[in-house]
Image: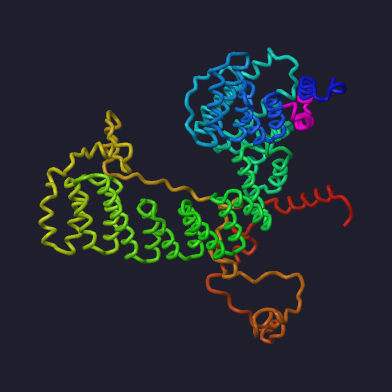
Amino acid sequence: VLQISKDDVTALQCKVVCLIQNGNFKEALGVINTHTKVLTSDVIAFEKAYCEYRLNRIENALKTIQSASQQTDKLKELYGQVLYRLERYDDCLAAYRDLIRNSQDEYEEERKTNLSAVVAAQSTWEKVMPEDLGLREATYELCYNSACALIGQGKLNEAMKKLRKAEAFFLFALIFLQDVTEEDIEAELAIIHGQMAYIMQLQGRTEDALQLYNQIIKLKPTDVGLLAVIANNIITINKDQNVFDSKKKVKLTNAEGVEHKLSKKQLQAIEFNKALLAMYTNQADQCRKLSASLQSQSPEHLLPVLIQAAQLCREKQHAKAVGLLQDFADQHPANAAEIKLTMAQLKIAQGSVTKACMILRSIEELQHKPGMVSALVTMYSHEEDIDSAIEVFTQAIQWYQQFQASQTRGAKPKSPVHLSLIREAANFKLKHGRKKEAISDLEELWKQNPKDVHTLAQLISAYSLVDPEKAKVLSKHLPSSDTMSLKVDVDALENSHGATYVRKKAGKLTGDNQQKEQGQGDVKKKKKKKKGKLPKNYDPKVTPDPERWLPMRERSYYRGRKKGKKKDQVGKGTQGSTTAGSSELDASRTASSPPTSPRPGSAAAVSATSNVIPPRHQKPAGAPATKKKQQQKKKKGAKGGW
């Protein structure tokens, strides 16, 4: 037909539709752009916008839809999809509501699914509390989208139940589906299981999440968006550990077409993790390049500048890191608080506690917060700057006084936070000897609650050191000892479960037991002495060696160690000492010389026990024999040569 008539509108429309059905979107769009005079926007607006949508030219598709003179139902359907891809969720929600309200056909279930997907995206990315649309969760897609919305709200346990329900719906639906391949089943289940693993990760069950993530990757799903998200989540679990695995996983996030499958926040999170991974792997230039790129895309975002500062700190350039953070805080006052907290942390790490305190006190919106006051007082106390610590308390108390005056008219009781600050200030002043300053705070507390005995006692204690007369006057307000006494059952207290000492209850004694108790009276039980163990070779006929408790060297019969061969031992021993061989050269020790007299008390013992080894030094019988047997066994079992 086109050979006969090149500009036949119906033939051109048919050709474009055929090309779209075959997935040739570029060629179809080329035909439309070639015949713009014939194929006007009124005639072929939907086909043109659909081709642009499928080619990821989302902005062009939106312009094509908006330029159409007549908004048909199919253009409205496509308009909703385009708005979703552009992340204009409020407009998308309104478009789908209008479609559901004004159309009745077999595609109503798909429209409800898309509507629930918009609600889930709002809950996840914009942290909007989703409204109840009254959608009946009759399909696994609706259950899955509902679970995603619950994850955005932080209701993780409910979300997990919804995902299990979605999985059950899908498996049940397989019974009625035909021509469904195993790959299709795995692909659908992988999406559900990936969301389950994400919930486990948020709950701190990282081992279970990691196992499920790796199972999905082993299936090799064709959805590059799913693989990129799972790889990114594994990298976040690894952190600075298992860096080699993270470097392999990061390749999955660079797959072609990922940027068209994920939202802007997902892509941004992946880029942040790439920069952090580069920092952990000591790729400083790559880290700086990625963080600078992120900062150019989102100038007001905190993470890029924090990553750059962290990299500088790893390079020991702390002053440069603080300067970078200060510049960002000056340019973006809205985010200055978080940046200044980081700066203070860096100063503390460098040991500049006073400078850190100055930075913290410059954060006006946090000066009065109890946590900030506590931190500053602790740091000033560490530096022994008590005056500055008291000044911090004073400024915080004044802020609450001014705030209360601006909110209410007339005298009203102070807030609990205000009172707790006054009490902490008084305790701090008392601790550091500022009695007079503490008295004014305690008096103010007592005025707020005259029945507070603890505050009154503190006030009297403080006045006793400054003005004893005033302390006596105030002591009259203390309750009497009668009203303060507590009626306590001492026996019940001692026998209670928590008592450290429990009095034993005396049991009733009857019959013989009672007589025995009376008879024994004051007699104390004596502990039986255990019999000492005797040596195995003990012989009762032989008298024990009286010197057995002495060391061998100190015994009278000790003659030194036996040596196999007499060797010249010159040079051994202490300097100037004589050797054993010198005794042979001594003329006084010849055979003609008379024998030396025995030691007193040793002659009888030596003669009586000359052939007996003392019990302590006797070897058990059979010891040499066992040694020989062991040697024989070794010889028998030996193999090889020497």
- Magenta range is 18-39
- Above or below 14: residue 388: below
Location of the C terminus by quadrant is bottom right
Task: Name the residue: 36% across, 66% down.
Answer: 385
Figure quadrant of residue 591: bottom right
Where residue 566 sits: x, y (%)? 76, 75
- Magenta stretch: dominant secondary structure: helix
Q: Is residue 406 magenta?
A: no
Residue situated in front as seen by the camera: 236 or 38: 38
* Of residues 310 and 161, the one drawn nearer to the viewer in this rendering: 310
On the image, the x and y values in percent for residue 309 come to 57, 58
Q: Quadrant of the N terminus?
A: top right
Q: Residue 151, can we see it?
A: no
Asked whether residue 20 is in view, the answer is yes
Q: Is residue 529 left or right of residue 90?
A: left
Give the residue drawn at x 87%, y 23%: 3
Q: Residue furthest bottom?
A: 587
Measured from the top left, where is residue 116 in percent x and y?
56, 25
* In-image side of 497 versus 243 (left or right): left
Q: Residue at x 54, y 65 (%)?
A: 319
| Closer to us: 397 or 576 | 397
In the rendered image of this protein, does residue 534 appear above or below residue 45? below
